[in-house]
Image (cartoon, rainbow, N blue to C red):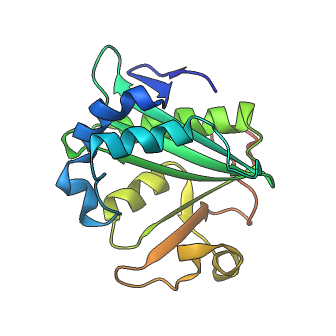
Amino acid sequence: MRTLATDRLTLEPLVAAHADAMFAVLSDPAIYAYENAPPRSAEWLRERYARLESRQSGDGTEQWLNWVVRPRGGAPIGYVQATVEASGRALIAYEFGSAWWGQGYAREAAQAMIGELIAHHGARSLAAVLKCANLRSLRLLARLGFSPASPEARARGRGAGRVPDGAGRRRRMSAKGRPEGEYRSAEHEGIVQ
């Protein structure tokens, strides 16, 4: 796993040493209007990050890839992550502090991560799971080329992706306007999603 760079951002492989700075970012209550809960403490986050440094699941069947995102020369503003399954399916996620929303950072970081997943980590398809009411995340995924997955794809999914769409429920996203299993974009010509 390597450090990634865009015009404005550096994406650093997540390590336990990022815990203190990320605890401050992830303590932003606005983040949790739709997703999860804040970390319990900086020490709890440090222990979690230390486990993630293995970059793989306990059984070795999944790659766990996490990058801390920072503007060039600045402090961390969030993270992007992916679980790449042995099948080549990558489940992506992201969280950014609300002070940095609406500035294109999440899109820029996610695009860099997606390119890296395909070029160097065997990703052949991409998926994301989110709560339907999270319109900001829905718009981001649409800009990245995702659209709601078909009912069949959701049924094949796992966990929260199996829940039917509805208020407060989760939605699985997949390739926009393409037959399932296919994704192409100007940024990633010929990429399978």
Residue 111 seen in the current view: yes
Against 40, is 105 above or below?
above
Residue 128's spot in the image, x, y percent?
A: 54, 59
Residue placed at 64% from the left, 82% from the top? 151
Residue placed at 49% from the left, 40% from the top? 110
The image quarter in which residue 71 lies:
top left
The image quarter in which residue 169 lies:
bottom left
Against 88, is 46 above or below?
above
Residue 176 seen in the current view: no
Looking at the rendered structure, the number of numbered marks drawn on it comes to: 0
Image quarter (top left, top right, bottom left or bottom right) of the N terminus: top right
Left or right: 42 in relation to 170: left
Residue 18's spot in the image, x, y percent?
A: 38, 29
Residue placed at 48% from the left, 25% from the top? 12
Q: Nearer the viewer, residue 125 or 160?
A: 160
Residue 26's spot in the image, x, y percent?
A: 28, 45
Residue 4's spot in the image, x, y percent?
A: 54, 23
Residue placed at 24% from the left, 65% from the top? 33
Query: What is the residue that sits farthest to the right in this orientation?
Result: 87
The image quarter in which residue 70 lies:
top left
Q: Nearer the viewer, residue 174 or 39?
A: 39
Left or right: 94 in relation to 60: left
Q: Nearer the viewer, residue 48 or 121?
A: 48
